[in-house]
Amino acid sequence: MTAQRLDGLAIAQQIKSEVAREVAALAERGIRPGLAAILVGMNPASRVYVNSKVKTCEELGIYSEKHELPETTTTEALLHLIARLNAREEIDGILVQLPLPRHIDTSRVLDAVDPAKDVDGFHPVNVGRLVRNQEALEPCTPAGIIELLERTRIPIEGQRAVVIGRSDIVGKPLALMLLHRHATVTICHSRTPQLAEIARQADILVAAIGRTAMITAEYVKPGAVVIDVGINKVTDRAEVERLFGPDEKRLSELASKGYTLVGDVHPTSVAPIAGYLTPVPGGVGPLTIAMLMKNTVKAARWRRAAVRSATA
Ligand code: NAD
């Protein structure tokens, strides 16, 4: 038996088509959702992410603008920009690409975003609403994982879910989302003893760790749903061969780009055991951007309806 591949790319495409239809419907009411993306410094991965978010906005008819600031930008300057974006009617979503340079106070910056425009779902108001299971702008990666599970009709209620990783961006919010859907949730992290033993109890196992191919067959219950959030660059040919065997596609990618992307789950070790598995790339990654688009339209609908009813 080999795990069924969960095609994040196809589901992301579905979500984006729905968003495009909603954008068209809003256009008939004279509304064009708008996203402002802020990029500070020269982090090449961050640049790629921001560019692909802006490009996806264009594809779906969402207005977007990119604010590229130098590495030396101060916290104060960033707060000033956010205040201006908060005040602009045509901007529905504000995205601050993380990580910010070390000298910037990331919490102060994230807390300055108007919660109604917080399309990443990082503001304490949205985090609090998520904890209370109230409607909120929710973080994109975990929200994308929930879409993937629900649209594939994988049951969550009553299932044992183990989330490895407790970050504010992925692990923690995902654990809450699974809990609200009535899974029995365990959160594990770098100081969890007997990790493999706990992971093996999971019907739904999520790896959001940032350690290349750490999750091997010994962590997986036969038939489990395994969601691989990790994105790790592997540059060493011997390691690629160890992970994938003589996989021509991977090796030619390595030769042309100098790296290949590998998740936190060991693909060839886990695939024979798991019931379902998300690939890397093409699993969780594309869903994150699709959910950002969905959040931008949601923010536009909520905020503009509120503005209109306040001014009516
Ligand atoms: P993070 O570094 O903030 O958190 C990693 C978590 O893993 C921590 O909570 C830590 O306790 C835990 N951990 C570390 N080593 C461990 C170990 N040996 N055993 C058990 N737990 C361990 O990372 P993050 O932002 O949550 O991201 C996790 C991974 O997911 C990264 O590879 C990141 O690139 C990727 N990611 C992907 C997407 C996407 O769209 N696919 C989005 C966000 C993050």
Image (tube, rainbow, N blue to C red):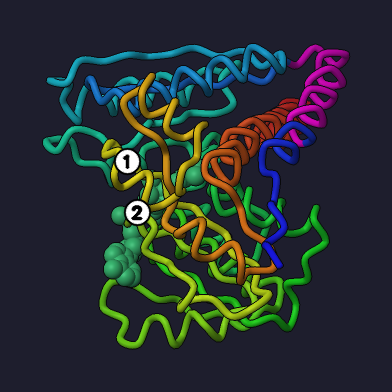
Q: Which mark is residue 234?
A: 1
At mark 2, the secondary structure is: loop
Q: Specify whether residue 284 is in view.
A: yes
* Residue 192 locus on image (x, y percent): 32, 81
**Label 2: how many Cα within 10 Å (few below 14, some 14–19, many 20+):** some
The C terminus lies in quadrant:
top right
Q: Residue at x 57, y 40 (%)?
A: 288
Residue 16: image quadrant is top right
- Closest to the observer, 79 or 247: 247
The part of the chain drawn in magenta is: 15-31
Q: Residue at x 29, y 23 (%)?
A: 44
Q: Name the residue that disc number 2 marks.
A: 212
Does any atom of ligand 1 lie closer than 8 Å to the CB of label 2?
Answer: no
The N terminus lies in quadrant:
bottom right
Q: Are marks 1 and 2 in contact (CB under 8 Å)?
A: yes
**Label 1: how many Cα within 10 Å (few below 14, some 14–19, many 20+):** some
* Residue 174 locus on image (x, y percent): 54, 62
* Residue 173 locus on image (x, y percent): 51, 61
Q: In the image, what residue type sits under mark 1?
A: Val
The Cα–Cα distance between marks 1 and 2, rounded to whole angstroms, is 8 Å
Magenta: main secondary structure: helix
Residue 103: image quadrant is top left
- Closest to the observer, 247 or 31: 247
211 sits to left or right of 30: left
Residue 23: image quadrant is top right
37 sits to left or right of 236: right
Q: In the image, what residue type sits under mark 2?
A: Thr
